[in-house]
Amino acid sequence: MFTTRTGKFNEIVEKIKGMGIHPFKCNFLGAIQAFTALSNSNWELKMDLYRRFGLSEDEIHNAFKIHPQCMLTSVKKITSIMDYLVNQMGYSSSYVAKYPCIFCYSLEKRIIPRCSVYKLLTCKGLIKNQFSLISLLNYNYESFLEKFVIKFEVEAPELLKMYPSAVKSRAT
């Protein structure tokens, strides 16, 4: 019994090393977690899903190396996030795959609201600098409100409707 588990574990470790993930890196444990949590059929299902969005094997493996949890995200969530970012926001699937931590964010609570704010501000010409998708999503909530909502509340009052908590945060 133990030799089978040990053998399987060693097989996983060698597979992860073969993908170029070094055992002393933080993401090594995440990769072990992903491989132990997913059956081979679920792994292939996720690979096929990413391929359907046009990603190559190398792009998928690079995404996994950066953030192994991208393979633990549900098929529904991956599909929803890719559909929104690629088909509605116009990002390439290759660009999204460079930032695989995106698949751990909530589409409804973080991705859509922040992309909507950014889109509105750029359409109105209020933002001069280009912001990467990942920088928009990585801001903590308060910093995002300050930098993108409160800062432009006069020029774009509709932002306060998109983020009503911005009004509350200024009142306290």
Image: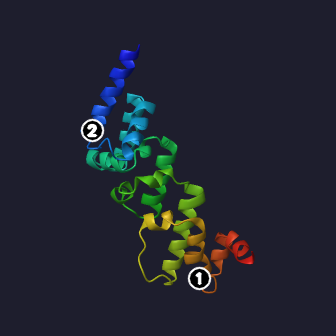
- Relative to 28, is 5 above or below? above
In the picture of the structure, the residue carrying the numbered disc 1 is: 152
**Residue 167 placed where, x, y %?**
71, 75
Assess disc 2: are there few (<14), some (14-19) or many (≥20) residues with their C-alpha within 10 Å of its C-alpha: some
* Circle 1: residue type: Phe
In the picture of the structure, the residue carrying the numbered disc 2 is: 17
Measuring 65% from the left and 81% from the top, which residue is drawn there? 157
**Residue 69 placed where, x, y %?**
44, 44
- Relative to 2, is 131 above or below? below
Measuring 52% from the left and 83% from the top, which residue is drawn there? 124
* Circle 2: residue type: Lys
Measuring 39% from the left and 47% from the top, which residue is drawn there? 26
Q: Indicate the quadrant containing the N terminus: top left, top right, bottom left or bottom right.
A: top left
Observer-side mark, 2 or 1, equals 2
Image marks 2 and 1: residues in contact by CB distance under 8 Å: no
- Relative to 55, is 16 above or below? above
**Front-most of residues 144 and 95:** 144
**Front-most of residues 86 and 132:** 132
Measuring 39% from the left and 36% from the top, which residue is drawn there? 32
Q: How is the rendered protein coloured?
A: rainbow
**Residue 95 placed where, x, y %?**
35, 60
Q: Indicate the quadrant containing the C terminus: top left, top right, bottom left or bottom right.
A: bottom right
Q: Give the spatial CA distance, label 2 vs label 1.
A: 48 Å
Q: Is residue 158 left or right of residue 26?
A: right
Q: Is residue 118 left or right of residue 157?
A: left
Q: Is residue 19 left or right of residue 138?
A: left
**Front-most of residues 54 and 21:** 21
Which element carries disc 1, helix, strand or loop?
helix
Which element carries disc 2, helix, strand or loop?
helix
Query: In the orientation shown, which residue stands out farthest toward the top?
Result: 1
